[in-house]
Amino acid sequence: MNSLAPPKKTGGNGHAALKTLTTSQVLRRAARKINGTFGSEQLCTWRYLPGICRIQTRLPELARKLSQRSRTRLVGWSVNGGYLRIFQEKIAFWRAKNLVTRYVAATNGAFSGHASPPLASKSGSGQ
């Protein structure tokens, strides 16, 4: 018997399981799960691989916080203008979404570098 000969058909369609697994509806659903992003332009996350998420920020304050996380590593940065840092962490997507939500909430208050200090009065007398 020739070992290079194709196997004989034994009935049925051997590719039927493949066709049911790769319908366009299944592929669209899988693409949403894999490529969906969460967050804003300043801080967002997406699933890179199962169990691994990437987090992108355009704010130096958030990049500093992300770089201080023990399991996070820098995997990308801007080379042509604008501030951009991309970090990767072994984390579930739902946890990464919670992280982004927490950091954005903190950014609205604690990290705001645009607030100016209160102005002191010019005269020492009560007005």
Image (cartoon, rainbow, N blue to C red):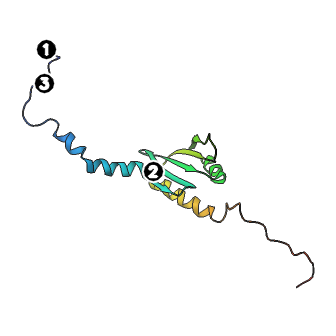
Find numbered disc 2 in the image and state the secondary structure of the residue it sits on.
Answer: loop
Q: Amino acid at mark 1?
A: Asn
Q: Amino acid at mark 3?
A: Pro
> Pointer 3: what residue?
7
Determine which quarter of the picture holds residue 71: top right
> Pointer 2: what residue?
92
Find numbered disc 1 in the image and state the secondary structure of the residue it sits on.
Answer: loop
Q: Amino acid at mark 2?
A: Ala
Residue 14 pos. (x, y %): 14, 35
Tag of residue 2 = 1
Crowdedness near tag 3: few (<14), some (14–19) or many (≥20) residues, C-alpha within 10 Å: few
Q: Is residue 66 above or below residue 102?
A: above
Whether residue 76 sits left or right of residue 123 in the image: it is left
- Where is the N terminus found, in terms of image quarters? top left
Q: Residue furthest right?
A: 124
First in sequence, mark 2 or 1: give its number: 1
Q: Is residue 61 above or below residue 49?
A: below
At a point 47% along the width and 50% down the height, the residue shown is 46
